[in-house]
Amino acid sequence: MLEVFIRSTFLGLQLGMTFALIAAGLTLIFGMMDVINFAHGALYMLGAYFGTVIAGTFGNYWLALLLAPLFVGLIGAAIEIFSLRPLYGRNPLYHILLTFGFAIAIQGAIVLIFGGQSRRIDVPTVLEGTIQVGPVTYPVYWLFVLIVSTVLIALIWIGIERSNLGILMRASAHDTEMVNALGIDVNKVFTGVFVFGAILAGIAGVLLGGSRSVHPGMGMGIIIEAFVIVVIGGLGSFRGAVYAALLVGLVTAYGSVIAPTLTELFLFAMMAIVLIIKPSGLFGATEAA
């Protein structure tokens, strides 16, 4: 029993930190740009598919982990510059409909190009097998994903809180006109944030693509979990997204052991409880990244 609990805890932390990568991009984009990006799950899916293509073509997982997120970032830049930017200042419903349309279009393109069969990213030999962690035997790849995700989230957190770029991002979100008056092109800042969020989604796609199946429905599946995380943490709060992602990861892992068919119910029940107690989420709706 203790072994099951420890194993589920490790799995929950691994899932939680990977979810945090996805939700962090989503919440940064909303917190700074007021854009509810329904295409974020599709960008995560693109990262996984690009990963399968690059790893399959060159036989190199590390190259896939490097290049696939960059390609996703390029697509994110095109989406922001050519479609979202002209809609800034309009009703948020325009952004929702546009990004939802992109999600549907990307999913359709994936089915057209790759078909509906599931795939998986081949991981290098060094990440195969298991390792003894205390009393449990744990897959090496899952431990690798946990470490990489944790390091990335820590670096992003430090960057937002302590770097000049983080200060510029927060200032652009709070007072766009003032930042423009200082001679800084806020449009470029917004493009950078959207691309950064897309890259994070792409990294998560490659990381999870090595342990989960890659299929055309994965984007729509993950976006539900991502929005549950963002709502629980508080819209626009990076800190809230990280804590909520860990909660969702642990509930998912424990739920899959206790009652696998009720895992989604547990997630939505947790979201409902948080919203009843604190409607703005754990860290408030007005906190900007």
Image (cartoon, rainbow, N blue to C red):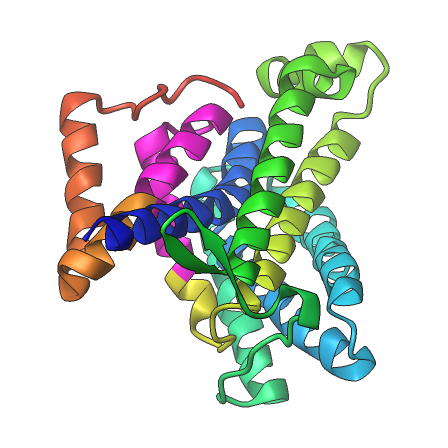
Q: Give residue 230's position: percent from left, percent from top.
A: 39, 37
Q: Is residue 64 visible?
A: yes
User: Is residue 131 positioned above or below 275 on the image?
Assistant: below
User: Is residue 252 positioned above or below 236 on the image?
Assistant: below
Q: Is residue 228 visible?
A: no
Q: Nearer the viewer, residue 168 or 141?
A: 141
Q: Is residue 226 magenta?
A: yes
Q: Nearer the viewer, residue 224 or 104?
A: 224
Q: Give residue 150's position: percent from left, percent from top.
A: 56, 38
Q: Is residue 10 magenta?
A: no
User: Is residue 146 positioned above or below 256 on the image?
Assistant: above
Query: Residue at image x 52%, y 74%?
Result: 107
Q: Give residue 222's position: percent from left, percent from top.
A: 42, 58
Q: Give residue 138's position: percent from left, percent from top.
A: 45, 59
Query: Residue at image x 31%, y 34%?
Result: 232
Q: Quadrant of residue 209?
A: bottom right
What kind of secondary structure does the magenta stretch mostly adopt?
helix
Q: Nearer the viewer, residue 93 or 17?
A: 17
Q: Which residues are magenta?
A: 222-249
Q: Nearer the viewer, residue 183 or 194?
A: 194
Query: Residue at image x 64%, y 54%?
Result: 203
Q: Is residue 272 left or right of residue 28?
A: left
Q: Is residue 227 left or right of residue 172?
A: left
Query: Residue at image x 48%, y 75%?
Result: 213
